[in-house]
Image: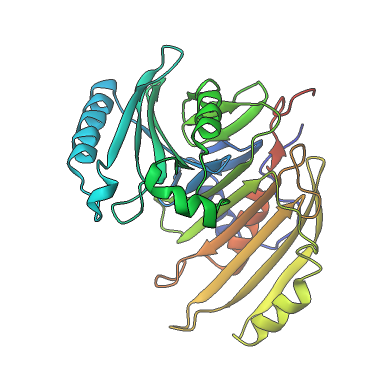
């Protein structure tokens, strides 16, 4: 499969601009995101405010050594044991601790959702260590079986329930399938990639991944990447483009290019917009490429790639250079081989 960084459009560049784009595209590396691969320069890394949700459990990861992980867990347990709820009836804040199943390294803390909430609303806060990666999973659930919630169970039975067994079962299943992975490791089996980890497929996970990639270079360009396997929009990006264009006109903006693109067997739509930030005269770029937007599902996850530039600091690169950079990056999008069951 061809996924080279050669741009599919003939953007006219000067010799200097070509050199600048070559520098921007230096050290390209495949990134596994969800069920897809996309190449980005190694200077780009995932920002801390990225989000991963699997079956509505929030997952965060970090690459640390085992002693640091063990210390983190000890300190967290001390913090939870000394946290007080606002209402004394909801104490203790830390309800239980559980060892991880299957001989895994880590612990599960069952705690109240927050100091100000009733203790019927809880979180299974899991800390797992796998292949040099600390994986934290936060799973919300409800346990309203205490006698003091009897009236609430009668008045609002859909809220004051007991979802603990179901959520714990889902968590144990997830723990049996998640493992740490190297930053640029590309798995060959069915499943989904999240930062620093891989989750083997079970054919039914609800997956939602939103990542922001920032670079240490001076381009002031960043990439937003989103993928999920449940969104199914009524209209597509191109079908919404007239309204987008009208909004752009109100902010001295315009559409540079829009249309359908066939990329590595994927049917995609893109829209490249440019305007000016309201707070200054810096040029604002917002390029977006989407696949499977109207047909999203387990076998066809939606994938969105977006390029944005910094508001306060203007990019030193010309519009033609940025468009060429975008073309080269977006052309590498492809489904990871073996990403789905029964392939």
Name the image quarter holding residue 96: top left
| In-front residue for pair 126/40 | 126
The answer, for residue 47, to whether it is visible in the render is no
Does residue 72 lie above or below 39 as drawn?
above
* Circle count: 0
Tell me if 262 is positioned left or right of 89 in this view. right
Name the image quarter holding residue 298: top right
The answer, for residue 30, to whether it is visible in the render is yes
Q: Residue at x 60, y 58 (%)?
A: 306
Percent x, y for residue 164?
49, 35
| In-front residue for pair 177/337 | 177
| In-front residue for pair 305/169 | 169
Percent x, y for residue 138?
43, 39
| In-front residue for pair 203/222 | 203
Percent x, y for residue 242?
78, 77
Q: Residue at x 50, y 57 (%)?
A: 222
Percent x, y for residue 252?
61, 86
Q: Residue at x 52, y 38 (%)?
A: 163
Does residue 142 lie above or below 240 as drawn?
above
Tell me if 40 is positioned left or right of 102 in this view. right
Does residue 81 lie above or below 296 as drawn?
above
Q: Quadrant of the C terminus?
A: top right
């Amino acid at each position: 499969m061809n996924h080279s960084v050669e741009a599919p459009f003939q953007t006219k560049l000067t010799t200097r601009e070509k050199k600048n784009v070559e520098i921007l595209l230096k050290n390209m590396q495949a990134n596994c995101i969800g069920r897809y691969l996309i190449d980005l320069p190694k200077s780009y890394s995932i920002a801390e405010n990225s989000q991963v949700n699997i079956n509505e459990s929030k997952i965060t990861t970090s690459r640390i050594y085992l002693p640091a992980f063990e210390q983190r867990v000890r300190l967290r347990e001390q913090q939870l044991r000394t946290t007080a709820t606002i209402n004394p009836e909801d104490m203790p804040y830390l309800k239980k601790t559980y060892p991880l199943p299957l001989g895994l390294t880590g612990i599960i803390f069952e705690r109240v959702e927050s100091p100000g909430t009733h203790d019927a609303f809880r979180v299974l806060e899991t800390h797992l260590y796998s292949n040099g990666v600390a994986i934290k999973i936060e799973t919300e659930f409800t346990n309203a079986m205490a006698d003091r919630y009897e009236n609430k169970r009668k008045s609002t039975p859909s809220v004051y329930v007991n979802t603990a067994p179901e959520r714990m079962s889902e968590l144990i299943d997830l723990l049996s399938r998640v493992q740490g992975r190297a930053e640029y490791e590309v798995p060959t089996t069915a499943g989904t990639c999240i930062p620093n980890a891989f989750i083997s497929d079970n054919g039914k996970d609800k997956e939602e991944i939103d990542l922001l990639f920032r670079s240490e270079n001076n381009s002031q360009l960043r990439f937003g990447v989103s993928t999920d396997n449940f969104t199914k929009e009524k209209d597509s990006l191109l079908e919404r483009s007239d309204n987008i264009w009208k909004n752009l006109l109100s902010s001295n903006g315009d559409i540079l290019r829009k249309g359908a693109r066939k990329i590595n067997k994927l049917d995609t739509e893109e829209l490249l917009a440019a305007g000016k930030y309201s707070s200054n005269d810096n040029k604002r770029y917002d390029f977006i490429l989407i696949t499977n937007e109207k047909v999203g599902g387990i076998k066809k996850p939606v994938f969105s790639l977006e390029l944005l530039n910094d508001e306060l600091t203007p990019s030193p690169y010309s519009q033609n250079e940025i468009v060429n950079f975008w073309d080269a990056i977006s052309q590498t999008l492809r489904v990871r081989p073996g990403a789905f069951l029964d392939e």
